[in-house]
Amino acid sequence: MRPPHPTLTPQELAIMKVVWDLETATVRDVFAAIRKTRQIAYTTVMTMMKVLEEKGYLLKDRAERAYIYRPARPRQQVVGAMVRDFVDRVFDGAAATLMLQLASDRELSRDERTKIRRILEEMDE
């Protein structure tokens, strides 16, 4: 088994979001959820879920005639690793530069600014 890479492809991330939301899912469950927003082949979903299992993101159990998949790692852990990887690659590890970029590229709502201030204050304590 190859070690998991923190950055998922867009298709892999879409599948993981469905599995995280459902907590356990068959290929058919994931296929149906993704088909609500875009066209995708059942076999593509099946192949991608096998890849995610090989990468260590999904665990699989046999139930009657189908496999039931569940996340191997929590959403927050995977997304956190993806964000850290992005900050390392794009901003040379400088998270402050990312925050400044986000703040300057779009107007933050009052609620978003309040949440950011609260998080920063909690980090200082």
Image: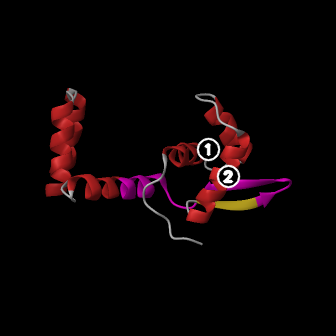
Does the magenta portion include 73? Answer: yes
The Cα–Cα distance between marks 1 and 2, rounded to whole angstroms, is 19 Å
Q: Earlier in the sequence, mark 1 or mark 2?
A: 1
**109 over 72 or under it: above or below:** above
Q: Quadrant of residue 63?
A: bottom right
**Position of residue 80 measured from the top left corner of the image (x, y, whole percent):** 37, 55
Q: Which residue lies at the image location 70% right of the left edge and 49% below the top edge? A: 46
Relative to residue 49, is residue 20 drawn left or right? left
Does the magenta portion include 57? Answer: no
Residue nearest the observer in this picture, 47 or 17: 47
Q: Secondary structure at mark 1?
A: helix
Relative to residue 79, is residue 55 drawn left or right? right
Amino acid type indicated by mark 1: Leu
Q: How is the image coloured?
A: secondary structure
**Mark 1 vs mark 2: in front:** 2
Relative to residue 113, is residue 60 drawn left or right? right
**Position of residue 4 measured from the top left corner of the image (x, y, whole percent):** 50, 65
Q: Which residue lies at the image location 61% right of the left edge and 64% below the top edge? A: 54
Residue at image mark 2: 47
**Numbered tag placed on residue 79 in the rendering:** none
Amino acid type indicated by mark 2: Thr
**108 over 116 or under it: above or below:** above
**55 over 38 or under it: above or below:** below
**Position of residue 29 measured from the top left corner of the image (x, y, whole percent):** 70, 41
Residue at image mark 1: 22
Q: Which residue lies at the image location 31% right of the left edge and 57% below the top edge? A: 84
Quarter of the image with the C terminus in it: bottom left
Q: Which residue lies at the image location 67% right of the left edge and 52% below the top edge? A: 47
**Residue 64 in view:** yes
Q: Secondary structure at mark 2?
A: helix
Residue range corresponding to the magenta coloring: 62-82
